[in-house]
Amino acid sequence: MADSQSIIKAIENLLNPAAEREKIEIADVQYMKENGDWVLRVFIDKDNGVNMDDCARASRVFEVVLDESDILKGSYVLEVSSPGIDRVLKSEKDFRRFCGHKIKVRTFDPINNQRNFLGGLNSYENGKIKINDVTKGEVEIETSNIKKANLEADI
């Protein structure tokens, strides 16, 4: 069986055209075994956020596409939901869209002996983000060095 990252990428590629037709975007995909069952979670979003009706409609559409493709062998549970307030940021579009928002970033390789950053996302340019980190000030991070990035709620 292929590694989980390649399966997730294949699922994203398969579902993206259907998502575009529904005028939604796929924010993240997770595929994992939980309590003995395979669970496929697809997090969707759109400019004004998504509601339960959007999730239900997307679930029906995605179910048809997945069943027709036979990309996933065996049974699985499909869950479609909003990415929530701590939305994952993965694409150039995500980083551009959420400039000015507070984010949390974990890098693969340390930058000045630090791997975790928290602060306002200042910009995205040429494959790099600039974040105003709460401890280091402005830090430039190559997106290829980002292990995980997500919005951080101000509570």
Image: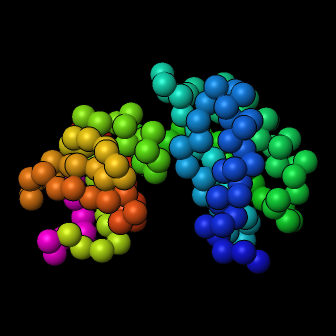
State the colouring used for the structure image. Answer: rainbow
- The one of 1 and 143 positioned closer to us in this rendering: 143
User: Bounds of the magenta span?
Assistant: 112-118
Taking the spot 79% from the left edge, 35% from the top edge, the residue there is: 61
What residue appears at the point 63 percent right and 47 percent down from the top-left corner?
42
Q: Is residue 84 left or right of residue 14?
A: left
Residue at left offset 54%, top offset 38%: 82
Q: Indicate whether 132 appears above or below 47.
A: below
| Residue 152 in sight from this viewpoint | no
Residue 1 lies left or right of residue 148; in this view the side is right
Q: Position of residue 101 (x, y in %)?
A: 27, 37
Total numbered badges shown on the rendered structure: 0
Q: Is residue 112 left or right of residue 46?
A: left
* Residue at the outermost top position: 48
Q: In the depicted view, which residue is nearer to us: 97 or 27?
A: 97
Q: Quadrant of the N terminus?
A: bottom right
Horizontal arrangement in the rendering, residue 76 relative to residue 53 (left or right): right
Image x and y of residue 21, in percent: 72, 28
Q: Quadrant of the image for the C terminus?
A: top left
What main secondary structure does the magenta stretch of the protein show? strand
Q: Quick check: 37 above or below 81?
A: below
Q: Which residue is drawn at the image coordinates 74% and 66% (left, top)?
A: 37
The answer to whether residue 91 of the structure is visible from this angle is: yes
Q: Nearer the viewer, residue 57 or 107?
A: 107
Horizontal and vertical percent position of residue 123 = 26, 41
In the rendered view, would you say 6 is above or below 20?
below
User: Residue 80's quadrant in the figure?
Assistant: top right
Residue 142, image x, y percentages: 32, 59
